[in-house]
């Protein structure tokens, strides 16, 4: 009998920073449903060799607004959490609120005290992580970005996220629902520099990364500790191609919403219209943009590659994914 591949469990603490509007909840559920489903759907598109471990995602949600609850420090220290992921929110990351201040302080403490834990931020999560690392977040005087926007990727962003510089795929298309934005790249942390991967005309900081000093430090669950280990993992899963470049990332953020689809964005636009926030030509532009295709699943695969869930590759290291 052929030996069954071992199972790999990736554990993600999802910090839920809001509840989407009722029309969104009615069709897609709240963020405790939307984010785990997005991650699972992204995982389902990753082609794996038969000998690679079967991957199972363990996502636990924490209400950081009303309950102000967080992963246990002991569990973090013992390597029970591979990543902390922060959701979107209608709130502003620069506000002086008890829950906002506590969230920013917690994220900074994770980076300092549990350095093997990866940090992932989506929209508000992108902004609050920037604040946690002493970056500046403000309301954008150029206005809202609503619906799918094509983000110009830097050369490093193209390489890291797997976009083809020789085709129209060199742009990252991502659903957007925001007016606040990160003004500039945060200052260096622990001797490493934050790098911006993408930009639009309205919001020049669209995706941030902070790298580790080494190529592919282990996940906390592998090392059974969140303390940094200054060595690369020799990973037989990737064979001759070596570890995916995304495995070198400590922090990964996106201003847009890879977890949103057209129906979610259209419902949010309608709610904002009823509130008198999105009207006239802005509403028309937003609804037209919402219908455009986006790279949500591709971005989801990048997030999972950061966590060691890599696609099957050929002997030369080429990806076998065409989705």
Image: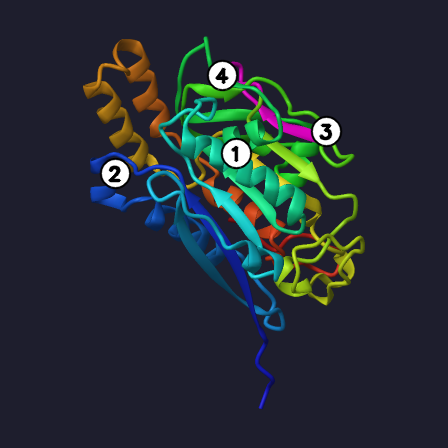
Q: Do the residues labelled 2 and 4 touch (CB within 8 Å)?
A: no
* Callout 3 crowding tier (Cα within 10 Å): few <14, some 14–19, many ≥20: few
**Circle 1 or circle 3, nearest the eye:** 1
Secondary structure beneath disc 4? strand
Q: Distance between the residues labelled 1 and 2?
A: 27 Å
The residue identified by callout 2 is 24
Q: Position of residue 26 (x, y in %)?
A: 20, 43
Secondary structure beneath disc 2? helix
The residue identified by callout 3 is 188
Visible residue check, residue 122: no
State left or right for residue 166 relative to residue 68: right
Q: Are marks 1 and 4 in contact (CB under 8 Å)?
A: no
Sequence order check, earlier mark of 1 and 2: 2
The residue identified by callout 4 is 138
Secondary structure beneath disc 1? helix
Against 209, residue 96 (above or below) is: above
**Circle 1 or circle 4, nearest the eye:** 1
State left or right for residue 6 relative to residue 218: left
Sequence order check, earlier mark of 2 and 4: 2
Segment colored magenta = 194-204
Q: Distance between the residues labelled 4 and 3?
A: 20 Å
Q: Do the residues labelled 4 and 3 touch (CB within 8 Å)?
A: no
Secondary structure beneath disc 3? loop
């Amino acid at each position: 009998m052929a030996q069954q591949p071992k199972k790999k469990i990736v554990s993600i603490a999802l910090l839920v920073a809001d509840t989407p509007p009722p029309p969104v909840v009615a069709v897609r559920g709240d963020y405790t449903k939307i984010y785990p489903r997005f991650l699972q759907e992204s995982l389902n598109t990753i082609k794996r060799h038969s000998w690679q471990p079967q991957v199972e995602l363990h996502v636990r949600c924490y209400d950081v607004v009303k309950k102000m609850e967080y992963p246990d420090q002991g569990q973090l220290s013992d390597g029970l959490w591979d990543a902390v992921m922060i959701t979107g929110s209608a709130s502003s990351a620069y506000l002086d609120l008890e829950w906002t201040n506590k969230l920013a302080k917690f994220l900074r403490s994770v980076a300092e005290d549990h350095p093997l834990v990866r940090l992932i931020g989506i929209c508000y999560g992108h902004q609050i992580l920037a604040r946690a690392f002493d970056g500046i977040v403000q309301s954008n005087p150029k206005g809202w970005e609503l619906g799918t926007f094509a983000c110009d990727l830097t050369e490093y962003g193209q390489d890291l996220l797997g976009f083809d510089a020789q085709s129209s795929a060199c742009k990252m298309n991502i659903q957007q629902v925001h007016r606040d934005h990160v003004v500039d790249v945060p200052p260096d942390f622990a001797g490493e520099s934050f790098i911006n991967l993408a930009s639009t005309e309205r919001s020049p900081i669209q995706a941030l990364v902070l790298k580790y000093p080494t190529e592919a430090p282990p996940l906390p669950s592998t090392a059974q500790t969140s303390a940094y280990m200054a060595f690369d993992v020799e990973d037989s899963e990737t064979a001759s191609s070596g570890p995916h470049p995304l495995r070198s990332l400590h922090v990964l953020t996106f201003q847009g919403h890879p977890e949103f689809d057209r129906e979610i964005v259209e419902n949010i636009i309608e709610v904002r219209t009823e509130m008198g926030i999105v009207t006239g030509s802005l509403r028309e532009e937003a609804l037209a943009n919402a219908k455009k295709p986006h790279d949500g699943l591709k971005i989801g695969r990048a997030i999972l590659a950061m966590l060691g869930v890599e696609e099957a590759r050929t002997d030369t290291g080429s990806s076998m994914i065409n989705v």
